[in-house]
Amino acid sequence: MKRKMLIFLSIILIFAVACSKSEEPGEDNSGTEIEENEGQEKVEESKTVKVCFPGGVPALTVTKLAYEKPIIDENIEIEYEFQNTPDLLASKILKGEADIAIVPSNLAAQAYNKEIPYKLVGTSVWGTLYMMSTEDINTFNDLKGKEIYSFGKNLTPDLVFKYVLRENGIDPDKDISITYLNAASEVGPAFISGKTNLAVLSEPAVTNILSKKEDAKIIFDFNEEWSKITGIQMGYPQASLIIKADLIENNKEFVEKFIETYVENMKWSSENPEQLGQYAEELEFGITQDMVVKGIERMNMGPLYVENMREEYETYYKVLLDFAPNVIGGKLPDEGFYFER
């Protein structure tokens, strides 16, 4: 009996010594614990970045990314958020809830002037505003005395429209009659139904109308007219990519990779309209594949980088400031607004 007790106590002693050794620094158990802690730290360091964008052509510049969701940084998850009304997008920006966004260029300036820390990276979409008609109109002078349907009174498309008219000798308040509808989406149906023979529209609505109304034609391309007036080849920067300053500061490598991926995506989008249109349909962005294929040449996506386009932005903002200072926040943005690589 005593012999059995001695053997039992010896086994307990050996087990205790073994456990004690396994807990000494440098042993395998210690290494496993460090690895587990490192894994926990990596989880804690993971970050979610929200990319917000509106409908229309700006959505097409990010469609492939939103559909395929490529990994840019393993520790950063990207959420692509489609904002189906201008008000929803503006709210996201003015509350600082978007980390990255594609926005009307005036909203970018407005946010910065309200000290909401976004930086302008560059142009996603150049002007896509057109005047359509079923009449034979060849010059701006032919518009005198006409009624024109439009949208967004005193918003940026309207200001571009009025600027081009004024620079071509037409007083928007005296020489023509502008009928504003409640939304851009109402202008196309009014034109198709024959309520008006003259309408200001943007892509992709222009392509949709051309496919449905045989006698419809584009009589003025406002981006082209802007170029003629200002001497700026690319036209006016309609929509822009902006990124939060703290994301740039704290995650510069990710930001650079995202911008590079976005630029490649826009190039792909221009070259692959059929696939782009399919993606847009499946994501329910309100754009059909047929619209994309037929209208891609008028959608004017990119090029992006702002460091080569400062003059284009300053010219655009000066025109808006002259017409309606509030649309850009009352003043021209200073140097801190522009992203530098």
Image (cartoon, rainbow, N blue to C red):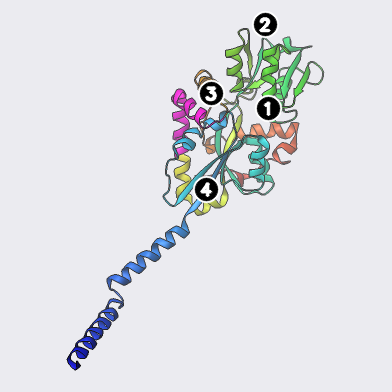
Determine the image quadrant of residue 195: top right
Residue 7 sits above or below residue 86 on the image: below
In this orientation, does residue 323 appear? yes
Residue identified by numbered label 4: 49
For mark 4, give the secondary structure.
strand
User: Dividing the image into 4 quarters, which one contains the N terminus?
Assistant: bottom left
Q: Earlier in the sequence, mark 1 or mark 2?
A: 2
Amino acid residing under circle 1 = Pro
Amino acid on which the number 4 mark rests in the picture? Val
The residue to which callout 1 is attached is 157
Q: Amino acid at mark 3?
A: Thr
Q: Are marks 3 and 4 in contact (CB under 8 Å)?
A: no
- Residue lying furthest bottom: 2
Q: CA distance from mark 3 to mark 4?
A: 28 Å
Crowding near pointer 4: few (<14 within 10 Å), some, many (20+)? some
Name the residue beneath numbered marker 2.
136
- Residue 275, by quadrant, is top left
> Disc 1 on helix, strand or loop?
helix
What kind of secondary structure does the magenta stretch mostly adopt?
helix
List the single residue furthest toward the left: 3
Q: Nearer the viewer, mark 4 or mark 2?
A: 4
